[in-house]
Amino acid sequence: MKKKIPKKVIAFFLSFICSVSVFAQTFPNVSSEIKKASLQHKKINSDSLLNLLKVYYKSPQIPDSLKRKAIRELCLLYGSNTNPEKNADSTLKYAYLLIALGKKNNDKYAVFDGLLFKIDAMSDAHNYPKSLEYCVNGLKYADSVGVEGFEFYHAQLHLYYAINLRILGDNDKSIEQNLLAIDFLKKSKKYHIEDLIDYQIDLSRTLSVKGKTDEAQRYLFNALADAQKLGLAELEMYLYNEIASTYLDVNQPQKAISYVQASLKFFENTNDFFALCEANFLAAKIFYQTKKYDNSIEYAKKALAVPLNTLPLRIIKNAYELLYLCYKAKHKPDEALMFYEKYIEAKEKSFNQQNALEMSFLRKRIEDAELNAQIQKEENEIREHKKLRNFLFLGIAILLIMLGFLWYYYRLLTKKSTIVEVQKKEIETLNSGLEEKVKERTIALQRAYDEIKDAMQKGQTLERKRMAADLHDNLGSLLTAINISLDTINPENLTEQEKKIYAGIMDMSENAYAEIRLLSHNLLPEELEKDGLKTALERLINKLNNNQRIKFFIKTGQLNRQSRSIELNMYAICLELIQNIIKHSQATEASISIFEKAGVLWLEVSDNGRGLTTNVEKGMGLKNIQSRLNDIGGEFFVDTANKGTRFVVSVPTDLVFES
C-alpha cells in the first residue's frame, strides 16, 4: 500500500516555497517609488506595492525585522498624497500594528514611527482632537525614552504639536514648539535639508496667521533658496504656494500671480492632488482680488473638484466663501445663496472641530497639571522621607537621654501624686459652689432686667397717654378758639386777596386740628392694648378715610397677637409712614398690607404719589423707623422703581431681641 503524505508536511513545503518566492523578489522601497512617480508625473502603482508588502507582513516565515519594515512602508503608502488609494483608517490600522510589533521586539524606532503615522493619519482625516491626543501621548513616550539617539523623533513630535497648537489658535506656543522642533532636527543624525524646509514652511504658516508676514516670507525665501540649490523641484513648488499665500494675505495679488502659475503648471502634471487643490484655490483668490469673478469661480470649483478622498476642510470652507462672494459681486443671488449655505455648513463643521480640539487641549492641560501635581507630591514625599530619616537618629539619641530623666522624675511625681489628688478634690468642691453662686446671680440679674424693661414700657405708655391728653386738651382747645374767632369775621367785607388768606387760614386750622386729633388718638390707642395690632390698624384706616382726601386701603392676613413691644413699634412705624404719605406724597390712594408668615411679621405700605424725595430720604422719619426696627430686630427697604413709593418692613416674631 502507498503511504499518505501528512498534511503538515505539505503545508510546510508550500509555505517554504512561498517564502522563497517572496525573498526572491526585491523588497519594495515606497519612498523611492513615490518620488519616482512624482518626477514622472504618474500615479503610483499602489495595487502591486500593497499586495507585495502584505505578503511580507502576513507570511509566517518572514522575520519580524522585515515585517516591521513592510508595515512601515504600508503606512507610508496609505498616507501618501500621490496614492489614489490614500486611506487614513488603513494608515491608523498598520500604525497600531507597527507599535505593537516594535514593543514586542523592543524596537523603539518602530514605536516612534508608529506614533508619528497615527498622528499623521488623524490629521489627514481632519480629526484634530484625536491627532492632538496622539501627539501628547507621543511626547510622553519620547520623554520616557530620552533624547539621545532619538532627536529626529523628538523634532517630529514637537512639529506635530506645533501644528495642532496653530489649528487650536495658540499661535505663540505653536511658534515656540516649532522653533524647538527645528533645534532638535539640527541635532539629529537623520537631519536632511528637505526636513528643515518642511519645518520652515510650517513655521511660516504660523507666523502668517499671527500677522508677521515679513518674518514668514523671510523663512520661506530662505527655504526656497535651499530647495533651488539642491534641485528639489517639488519642494520648490510647495514653497511657491506658501509664498503666494502670504502675498494674498496682505492683498498683493500681482506679486502672487507668477508663483501660482508655476505651481499650477507643475502640479497639473503630477498626482499630488493636495498641492493641486491648494494651487487652484490660490488662483481663485488671485482672480477674486483682481475682480475677475468668472475666472475666480472657475478655479474655486476646480479646487473643490480635485479627486481627493477627503478635501481639507479649510479649503472647502474658503472655496465656498469665495464662490459666494463672487456670485454676490456678479449679482446672482440664487447661486450666491446656495454657496453661502454651503459655506455656513462648512464653517459650522470647522467650528465644531475647533471646539472639540479646544476641549482636547484643555483636557491635556488638566492632565499635565495633575501629572505635575503628582510629581510635585512625590518629590515632597521623598524630601519628607529624607527629613524623617535624618531626624530618626537624632530622635533615638534624644529619646535615650529623656528616658533617664523620665525615670528620675517618675520617682518624684509618684511622691507628689497624693498631694495633687487632695488639691484637685478641694478645687472641685470650690468650683461646684462657685457655679451655683454664678447661676443664682444670673437669675437675679435677669429678673432685675425684666423688671426694668417692664417699668420702661409702662413709663412709655403713661408718657404717651399724658402727651395725647395734653395735645387734645391744650392745642385742641387753642385751635378751637382760633376757629371760633375766625368764624366771627365776615368774609363778605374782605377784599379778594384777604378772602384767599382767610380761606387758607381756615383750611390750615382745620388740617392742624385734624392732625392733632389723629396724633392724640394714635399715640397709644386703647384698641392696640385690648384687641391687638390688626384691629388698631383697621380702626385707624377707617378714621383716616373719614377725614382725608387720600383713600386708604388695608389688607390683613393671618395675624396672631405679638409681644407688646413689637405691636407698639409696628403701629408707630405704620403711623409714621401714613403721616409721610399725607404730608409729602401727593397721592390719591394708599394701601397697607400686614401679615405673618414663617415666623416673620411683614408690613407693606405703598402709595401712587410722586415718589420719595431726597429731603424725605434724609429726614427724621426714616431714622425713627430704623431706630424702632433696631429695638425689635427688624429691617426695611424702600422701592421707588415704579410710580409712587413702597415700604416693606419685616420683623422676626420668634426671636427675643434687645437693642
Image (cartoon, helix red, strand yellow):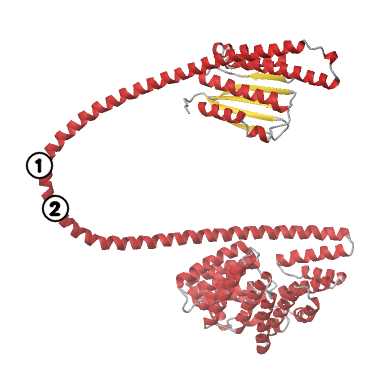
Specify the farthest residue to the right.
331
- Which quadrant of the view contains residue 178? bottom right
Neighbor class of circle 2 (other Cα within 10 Å; few <14, some 14-19, many 20+) is few
Residue that badge 1 annotates:
415
The residue depicted at 80 percent of the width and 76 percent of the height is 253
Position of residue 120 relative to residue 576, above or below, is below
Q: What's under tag 2, amino acid-wise?
A: Phe
Question: Quick one: SS at disc 1?
Answer: helix
- Which mark is first along the chain, 2 or 1? 2
Pinpoint residue 630: horizontal percent, then vertical percent.
52, 29
Position of residue 391 relative to residue 146, above or below, is above
Label ID, residue 405 = 2
- Which quadrant of the view contains residue 470? top right
Residue 647 visible within the image: yes
Nearest the eye: 103 or 18: 103
Question: Quick one: SS at disc 2?
Answer: helix
Pinpoint residue 191: horizontal percent, then vertical percent.
56, 83
Q: What's under tag 1, amino acid-wise?
A: Lys
